[in-house]
Image (spheres, helix red, strand yellow):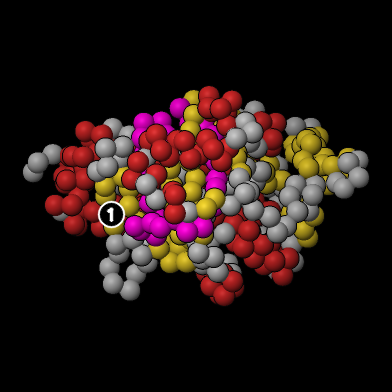
C-alpha cells in the first residue's frame, strides 16, 4: 500500500518463499474484500481458493450452530497459506517493494530516542544496517520489535499452542467446522487441493506431550475430546508434514512510538476462533498504511503524529472483544445451548451475528445491550 502511494519501501522477511505457515487457512468475506482491493483476488481464484458453503460451531456436548449464507453468497473461502503469501509477495514486488528474504531482525536503531532503522542479519549472518524514516514491525505474535518497544502485555489465558495438520480422504459436514471442549479447540476446513486443514489449539502446558510425536498427539486428542470427528479419522490419511507454533496472546499498551509502528499479530494477538485471523492482519495493515502515509507526507513520524493509529485500531479491538465473547460462550455448555436455541429460533439474530463474524458489518451491531438482551433473555 505504501509503495503504491509512492514511498520507497523495503520488506525484510526471515522466511524464504514459497513456504507454508501454521494457520487455519480461512478467509472471511471481509478479508476477501481487502484482497480484491489489493489486486490479488483474480490470481487467488486462478491458483486455488475453495468457497465455504456452510460453517458450524460445535460445543463439547455436540450442540451445534450452523450457518449458511443467503443464496449466491459465500460464508468464506479456504486457501493454502503457501499460495496466499506467495501471491501477496509477488504483488508487493510488482508495485515497487524491495524484498529481502532470509533476513533476521536483531534490533532497532535509535538515535536521540527516535527509531532510525534496523539492524538485521542476512545470508552471511553478518549484521547489516538499514536506515529508514519509519519502521513497521509486522513480525508476528512473538514480535521482537514489540518487545524492544517494551509495550507487550501478555493475556495469560491465551498462552496457547497450535498444531496444524493436513489430511486426505477426511470428510466434513461443512466447509468449515469449529469445535470446543474446555481448553481444547479444533478447527477443520476443506482446502482447494481436496485436503483438510485440521488444527488443534491447546494450552502451552501440553508442549511436553507433543515433542517428537505431534501427529499421534493430535489423533489422541481428537479421540478424547471430539468423538464425532474421531469416527471419521480412520477414513483419512494424515500428511507427514506437521507444523506447531506457540500462540502468545497479547495486546500492546501502544502500537506506535517515535519512528516505529506495529502491525498484524505484533500489535495484538487473540485466539482467532471465529476464523478472522487473516482479516485482522489485513485490516490492521490498511489502518497502519493510512497513518504511515499521513505521517510520512507531513514529515512528522513522532509518537504524537502516529498516535492516531491507536485510535484507528479501536474498531479491531471491538472485534477482538467479540471473538473472546464467542469463545467464552462456546466453552460454557449451558450458555452455549441457550444461545444456540435462541439463534435457531430467531434467524434474524443469527444472520446479524454471522454478518459481523464475516467482517462485513461493524461489531457494534451485536455488541450492544439490545442485541445481547434479545439473544440471552426469553423476550
Callout 1: helix, strand or loop? strand
Q: How many numbered badges does the structure rendering display?
A: 1
Q: Nearer the viewer, residue 311 or 340?
A: 340
Q: Nearer the viewer, residue 197 or 94?
A: 197
Q: What residue sits 62% from the left and 49% below the top?
A: 240
Horizontal side of 330 relative to 175 (left or right) equals left
Residue 307 found in image quarter: top right
Are there few (<14), some (14-19), or many (20+) residues within 10 Å of tag 1?
A: some
Residue 208 found in image quarter: top right
Q: Position of residue 200 (x, y in %)?
A: 48, 41
Q: Is residue 217 above or below residue 7?
A: above
Q: Nearer the viewer, residue 231 or 53?
A: 231
Residue 180 in magenta stretch: yes
**Span shown in magenta:** 157-184
Task: Report if residue 161 is visible in the image.
Answer: yes
Residue 334 found in image quarter: top left
Horizontal side of 214 relative to 228 (left or right) equals right
Q: Is residue 271 above or below residue 253?
A: below
Task: Report if residue 320 is visible in the image.
Answer: no
Q: What residue sits 57% from the left and 75% below the top?
A: 46
Q: Position of residue 29 (x, y in %)?
A: 42, 62
Residue 85 in magenta stretch: no
Q: Nearer the viewer, residue 24 or 103?
A: 24
Q: Could you tell me what secondary structure mostly forms the magenta stretch?
A: strand
Q: What residue sits 45% from the left and 63% below the top?
A: 77
**Residue at the extreme left of the image, as rendered:** 379
Q: Position of residue 148 (x, y in %)?
A: 70, 31
**Residue at the extreme front of the image, as rendered:** 234
Horizontal side of 271 relative to 226 (left or right) equals right
What residue did someone put label 1 on? 66
Q: Is residue 58 above or below residue 81?
A: above
Amino acid at each position: 500500500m505504501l509503495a503504491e502511494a509512492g514511498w520507497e519501501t523495503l520488506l525484510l522477511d526471515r522466511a524464504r518463499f514459497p513456504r507454508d505457515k501454521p494457520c487455519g487457512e480461512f478467509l472471511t468475506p471481509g478479508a476477501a474484500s481487502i484482497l480484491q482491493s489489493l489486486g490479488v483476488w483474480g490470481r487467488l481464484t486462478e491458483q486455488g481458493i475453495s468457497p465455504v458453503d456452510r460453517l458450524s460451531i460445535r460445543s463439547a456436548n455436540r450442540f451445534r450452530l450452523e450457518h449458511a449464507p443467503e443464496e449466491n453468497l459465500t460464508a468464506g473461502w479456504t486457501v493454502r497459506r503457501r499460495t496466499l503469501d506467495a501471491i501477496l509477495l509477488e504483488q508487493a514486488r510488482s508495485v515497487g517493494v524491495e524484498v529481502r528474504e532470509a533476513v533476521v531482525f536483531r534490533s532497532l536503531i535509535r538515535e536521540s530516542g527516535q527509531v532510525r532503522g534496523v539492524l538485521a542479519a542476512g545470508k552471511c549472518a553478518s549484521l547489516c544496517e538499514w536506515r529508514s524514516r519509519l519502521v513497521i514491525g509486522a513480525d508476528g505474535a512473538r514480535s521482537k520489535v514489540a518487545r524492544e518497544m517494551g509495550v507487550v502485555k501478555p493475556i495469560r489465558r491465551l498462552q496457547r499452542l497450535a498444531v496444524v495438520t493436513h489430511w486426505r480422504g477426511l470428510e466434513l459436514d461443512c466447509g468449515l467446522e469449529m469445535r470446543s471442549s474446555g481448553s481444547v479447540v479444533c478447527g477443520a476446513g476443506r482446502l482447494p487441493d481436496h485436503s483438510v486443514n485440521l488444527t488443534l489449539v491447546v494450552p502451552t502446558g501440553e508442549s511436553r506431550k507433543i515433542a517428537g510425536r505431534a501427529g499421534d498427539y493430535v489423533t489422541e486428542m481428537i479421540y478424547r475430546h471430539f468423538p464425532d470427528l474421531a469416527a471419521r479419522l480412520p477414513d483419512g490419511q494424515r500428511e507427514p508434514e506437521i507444523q506447531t507454533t506457540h500462540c502468545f496472546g497479547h495486546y500492546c499498551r501502544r502500537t506506535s512510538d517515535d519512528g516505529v509502528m506495529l502491525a498484524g499479530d505484533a500489535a495484538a494477538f487473540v485466539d482467532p476462533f471465529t476464523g478472522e485471523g487473516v482479516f485482522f492482519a489485513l485490516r490492521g495493515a490498511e489502518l497502519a498504511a493510512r497513518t504511515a502515509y499521513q505521517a510520512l507526507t507531513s514529515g512528522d513520524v513522532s509518537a504524537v503524529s502516529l498516535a492516531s493509529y491507536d485510535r484507528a485500531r479501536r474498531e479491531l479491538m471491538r472485534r477482538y472483544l467479540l471473538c473472546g465473547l464467542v469463545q467464552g460462550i462456546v466453552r460454557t455448555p449451558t450458555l452455549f445451548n441457550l444461545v444456540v436455541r435462541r439463534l435457531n429460533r430467531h434467524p434474524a439474530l443469527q444472520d446479524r451475528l454471522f454478518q459481523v463474524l464475516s467482517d462485513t458489518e461493524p461489531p457494534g451491531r451485536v455488541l450492544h445491550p439490545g442485541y445481547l438482551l434479545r439473544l440471552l433473555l426469553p423476550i
